Image (tube, rainbow, N blue to C red):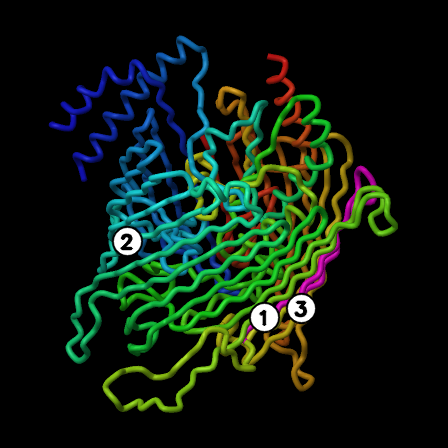
């Protein structure tokens, strides 16, 4: 009742200042069938239905927002514990030029996220938002200070938010020297420095061990830019954090990222390095998978979009430890040159590789009371390969209406470490070729095709894993409102004849401004899936999927 | 929780009431550009609502892993000089790449020779505020900061529809 009174008091305010409401809605309905061939089973409900709607309200310096979520029950690929309809996010806040305060739920990232990142990916059902208080202060130009104090979202059950056990606290500061210090305004070297401290608290309820109740993670970052060269990096240390992930060891953890790039018009070069050891950092030490992670440690490689490349052998960071490197070069041959032709030709070469770090055990006594099981240093790598990806792609426009993209990929994944298949062991090496053609028939009609072939290297003359694959995709679009597409993936090289399966799928879409309807029918493999102009992650299934999105 | 909810419902119903009033007065419900602080890839912080640009602005949400997004921005790239000369439009390409692929953004942008203003939205703050479900999603904003057109897809030819909308603005 007092809230009602409060709202009535605020009432006259609305008369004089302009309010803005924005947001979006997404609904997905699935009718799924049994398909023993691909291992898809029909859920008891037959139909699955997910929806959410965000509403954001701002008026002057005041802001409020909420998201209603509904899982009746959740679609495939979402955490299976999600159910019910209710509020999954809500906040009120106030922001002016100096302070920005939020009470309720919020998303946040410190630096590159090695210490703290709360974010959402609704297509995957991933959401580790923080619920509490956040204060951002900008005392002067170029200086940003942040503080957060919150519980973390673990789940959404019976229409209610469920939190992780532990509480998360953190502060972060960043200074852009060229903006903050007047004298450096026109200095050719751009310098940004930052530092973070994060701490989590969780009760120690272990009867046999003395677990640290408060676990900190802290470090610093810097970014320098001089003319065409940029160098940035971050280093984070995590305190002793015995957990289910690390088999309750008492080692400190560390993570480092470094990027060096050179760019000018027509050329981009990037060299990256990343080193991770014992860095799983969750607000509940007993959780696993993607649950209540406080920090963010993505793998260091290109995110591929062609379906055979992205869905069959994707690599996920090993939280316990890895050392990774990446190089990426993009060069565009100018228009009017021999290679460039009339429209210019682009070539991109990308190389990424990941190794097991060395865990030094000399001088370590496993029976002593420290609980420290090895020593590790940043970028101290062994020869044991986890992942390697070499890929090249060439974009060539022939004339106004016709263009090609030619791509080659060689992907090696260590299936003993980054488990992706139950049908193989050790390194799986695959070669993938893709030819993409786009042809514009007239002003509004166009057709696009993809031919993809994947060739898995044999081992001792025997077919490895699921063998070879081929994919064909044909997409017809009528700008700006319609598209139709057909795709078939065929596992023609499977060593078991009964598993040489086709995965056909038809998708149709209608788009009007910010409204979008799509219907698809067929079999789908899991992975990043791009059709009719939009990419999203889709789990494996067989059946009918109807989806609706609207922004407002 | 319940009181919280009723508070928000009351709040939103009031604003709805005024949105309707506005409808009667201005004959349209306007959606203003939200204010979010993002970095460009040189590390400079910019406020999305105060970019200080003169003409209309196209906000195009994209990612290095989104093939149709790159097709759209490459198609506009070929036309951009003419568009700018004729309408004074600026394109702001908002990358939603997170830390996994964020470092590849300048490589792609400069490698392709794009002349757009690039903003980085690695944690999806601006994406969320703009109500973007998936990419590509392109918005057209007039000089008053009002969103006048948006389109959540890319098919070849869509850029011509967008250009018609930009021309409508410059005729006003």
Q: Which mark is residue A152?
A: 2
Spatial separation of the CA atoms under disc 3 and disc 2:
39 Å
Q: Nearer the viewer, mark 1 or mark 2?
A: 1
Quick one: SS at disc 3? Answer: strand
The answer for which chain carries disc 1 is A
In the rendered image, residue A436, in percent from the top left (x then y), is placed at 73, 51
Spatial separation of the CA atoms under disc 1 and disc 2:
33 Å
Q: Is residue A408 magenta?
A: yes
Q: Nearer the viewer, residue A43 or B144?
A: B144
The answer for which chain carries disc 2 is A
The answer for which chain carries disc 3 is A
Q: In the image, is residue B28 above or below residue B76?
A: above
Does residue A498 appear left or right of residue A102 in this picture?
right
Between discs 1 and 2, the one toward the N terminus: 2
Marks 1/2 in contact by CB < 8 Å: the verdict is no
**Both labels 3 and 1 in a single chain:** yes
Return the residue at label 1. Answer: A353
Q: Nearer the viewer, residue A80 or A89?
A: A89
Does residue B130 appear left or right of residue B105 in this picture?
left
In the rendered image, residue A241, in percent from the top left (x then y), is placed at 28, 71
Return the residue at label 3. Answer: A410
Q: State which region is magenta.
A: A386-410
Residue A88 visible in the snapshot: no
Q: Is residue A298 magenta?
A: no
Crowd band around label 1 with a 10 angstrom C-alpha radius: few (<14), some (14–19), many (20+)? many
């Amino acid at each position: 009742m007092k809230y009602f009174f409060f709202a009535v008091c605020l009432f006259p305010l609305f008369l004089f200042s302009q309010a803005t409401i924005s947001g979006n809605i997404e609904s997905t309905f699935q009718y799924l069938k049994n398909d023993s061939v691909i291992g898809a089973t029909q859920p008891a409900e037959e139909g699955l239905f997910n929806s959410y709607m965000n509403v954001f309200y701002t008026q002057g310096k005041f802001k409020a927002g909420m998201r209603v979520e509904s899982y009746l029950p959740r679609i495939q690929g979402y955490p299976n514990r999600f159910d019910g309809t209710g509020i999954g996010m809500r906040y009120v806040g106030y922001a002016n030029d100096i302070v920005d305060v939020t009470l309720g739920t919020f998303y946040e990232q410190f630096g590159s996220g090695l210490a703290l990142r709360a974010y959402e990916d609704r297509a995957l059902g991933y959401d580790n938002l923080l619920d509490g208080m956040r204060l951002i202060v900008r005392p002067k130009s170029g200086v940003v200070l942040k503080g957060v104090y919150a519980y973390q979202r673990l789940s959404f059950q019976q229409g209610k938010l469920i939190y992780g056990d532990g509480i998360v606290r953190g502060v972060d500061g960043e200074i852009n020297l060229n903006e903050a210090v007047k004298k450096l305004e026109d200095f050719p070297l751009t310098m940004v420095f930052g530092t973070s401290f994060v701490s989590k608290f969780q009760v120690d309820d272990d009867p046999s061990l003395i677990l640290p109740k408060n676990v900190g993670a802290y470090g610093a970052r810097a970014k320098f830019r001089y003319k065409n060269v940029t160098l940035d990096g971050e280093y984070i240390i995590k305190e002793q954090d015995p957990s289910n992930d690390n088999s309750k060891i008492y080692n400190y953890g560390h993570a480092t990222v470094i990027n060096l790039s050179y760019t000018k018009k027509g050329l981009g070069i990037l060299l990256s390095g990343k080193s991770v050891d014992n860095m799983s950092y969750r607000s509940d030490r007993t959780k696993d998978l993607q649950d209540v992670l406080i920090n963010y440690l993505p793998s260091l490689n290109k995110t591929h979009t062609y379906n055979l490349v992205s869905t069959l052998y994707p690599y996920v960071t090993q939280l316990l430890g890895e050392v990774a490197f990446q190089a990426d070069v993009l060069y565009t041959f100018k228009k009017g040159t021999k290679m460039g032709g009339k429209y210019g030709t682009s070539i991109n070469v990308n190389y990424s590789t990941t190794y097991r770090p060395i865990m030094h055990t000399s001088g370590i006594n496993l029976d002593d009371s420290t609980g420290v099981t090895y020593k590790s240093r940043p970028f101290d790598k062994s020869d044991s390969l986890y992942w390697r990806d070499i890929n090249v792609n060439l974009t060539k426009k022939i004339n106004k209406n016709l263009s090609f993209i030619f791509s080659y990929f060689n992907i090696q994944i260590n299936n003993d470490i980054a488990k992706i298949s139950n049908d193989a062991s050790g390194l799986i090496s695959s070669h993938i070729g893709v030819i993409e053609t786009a042809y514009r028939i007239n002003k509004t009609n166009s057709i696009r095709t993809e031919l993809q072939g994947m060739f898995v290297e044999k081992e001792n003359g025997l077919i490895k894993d699921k063998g070879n694959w081929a994919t064909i995709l044909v997409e017809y679009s009528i700008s700006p409102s319609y598209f139709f597409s057909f795709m078939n993936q065929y596992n023609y090289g499977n060593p078991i004849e009964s598993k040489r399966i086709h995965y056909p799928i038809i998708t149709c879409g209608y788009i009007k401004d910010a409204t979008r309807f799509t219907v698809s029918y067929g079999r789908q493999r899991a992975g990043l899936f791009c059709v009719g102009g939009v990419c999203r992650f889709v789990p494996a299934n067989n059946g009918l999927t109807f989806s609706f999105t609207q922004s407002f | 929780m319940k009181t919280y909810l009723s508070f928000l419902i009351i709040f939103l119903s009031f604003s709805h009431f005024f949105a309707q009033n506005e409808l009667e007065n201005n004959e349209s419900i306007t959606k203003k550009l939200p204010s979010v602080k993002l970095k460009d890839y040189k590390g400079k912080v910019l406020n999305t609502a105060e970019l200080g640009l003169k003409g209309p602005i196209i906000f195009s949400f994209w990612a290095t892993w989104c093939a149709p997004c790159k097709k759209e921005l490459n198609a506009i790239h070929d036309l951009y000089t003419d568009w700018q000369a004729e309408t004074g439009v600026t394109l702001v390409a908002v990358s939603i790449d997170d830390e996994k692929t964020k470092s590849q953004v300048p490589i792609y942008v400069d490698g392709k020779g794009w002349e757009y203003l690039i903003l980085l939205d690695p944690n999806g703050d601006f994406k969320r505020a703009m109500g973007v479900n998936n990419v590509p999603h392109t918005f057209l904003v007039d000089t008053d900061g009002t969103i006048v057109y948006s389109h959540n897809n890319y098919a070849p030819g869509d850029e011509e529809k967008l250009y018609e909308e930009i021309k409508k603005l410059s005729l006003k």
